[in-house]
Amino acid sequence: MRKLAWVALLLVFAAGTSFAQSPAAARKLIEHSMVVTGHVLIEPDGSASGLELDQPEKLPAVVTRMVEGAVPGWRFEPVLVDGEPRKVKARMSLRLVANMLENGDYRISMRSGYFGKDALSPDERGAVERSSILAVAKQTRISYPMQAARVGAQGTVYVTVRVGRDGSVLDAVAEQVNLRTRGTPRQMESMRNMLARSAVSGVREWTYAPPTSGDLVGEESWSGRVTVDFTLDGEGRPEYGQWHAYIPGPRAIAPWLVDDLGAHGSPDLADPDGLHLVGQGLKLLTPLQES
């Protein structure tokens, strides 16, 4: 695809930056992505038989075609209800990425996906889920680091928390920081560190409501992901169906998740408005996208 006509590049330069890289080199740092949500229908044998996209009218046609074309190749570990395989409608969240090629074209791919354990009807889920999941009970506002604000640093921090049975945070790690502000490599590292420290410090002050029913109730601790967005001048999140431009940061793995990393998915699929429980999704047995 020659250009991303629907991409709005909102990346800004850090105040006072002397950016040494050429424009072409700088562009290679930038990643464009969007999260596509909806539901997938899964048969008792684990095959995917249908797809319902959220707000399909807002999605670029190329994205819709790509997701619809991938679904027939998906196969999941069958969902058991009372020991029997059951047809289910699972919540879906996909991260699509557009990368610039050497010739200036863009290649779009599906990088990661999360499929929720939604084996009940919407009405049943509404009655059951509130007590069977980890939820935020008390949330305090996270402060914008003063020095980060001075240099215009903006970005998104994906924080993984480990919550104890009393609802307090036992540990918290910034898994990834994606910047919307450019600078030299050293400046960007400094900006990431400032935003990460503030996000982790703030999230540690929150309290959570542990599950009181369901499969997770007997655990000693629970892990979840929280998205913390640092934005200046009232710039909001991109609307659903729009490409989001940023400079991805390196990923740091929460130490208590290292032994089973493959089961815990990508941090950038965390719910931007709440808590994403780690390691509780359905298991996709086939590639997300055929090569």
Image (cartoon, helix red, strand yellow):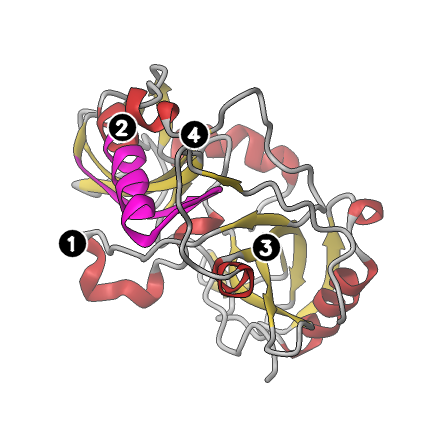
Is 172 within the magenta?
Answer: yes
Q: State which tag comes first along the sequence, 3 or 4.
A: 3
Q: Tell me the residue that label 4 is attached to.
A: 152
Q: Dividing the picture into quarters, in which one does residue 171 lie? A: top left
Task: Using the image as rendered, state which of residue 207 and residue 188 is in the foreground.
Answer: 188
Instruction: Estimate how packed mark 1 is, as few (under 14), some (14 to 19) or many (20 or more) residues with alpha carbons within 10 Å.
Output: few
Indicate the amino acid at tag 4: Gly
Hey, which residue is sitting farthest bottom in the picture? 291
Q: Tell me the residue that label 1 is attached to.
A: 255
- Tag nearer the camera, 1 or 2: 2
Q: Which residues, given as a range, are shown in magenta?
A: 171-197
Task: Using the image as rendered, state which of residue 255 and residue 9 is in the foreground.
Answer: 9
Mark 3 falls on what kind of element? strand
In x, y percent, where is residue 30?
52, 57
Using the numbered discs, state the Cα–Cα distance from disc 3 to disc 4 in whole angstroms.
22 Å
Residue at x 49% of width, y 42% of height: 180
Indicate the amino acid at tag 3: Ser
Instruction: Estimate how packed mark 2 is, as few (under 14), some (14 to 19) or many (20 or more) residues with alpha carbons within 10 Å.
Output: some
Indicate the amino acid at tag 2: Ser
Please indicate whether residue 199 sits to the left or right of residue 284 in the image. Answer: left
Number of the label disc, if any, that sits on residue 198:
2
Mark 1 falls on what kind of element? helix
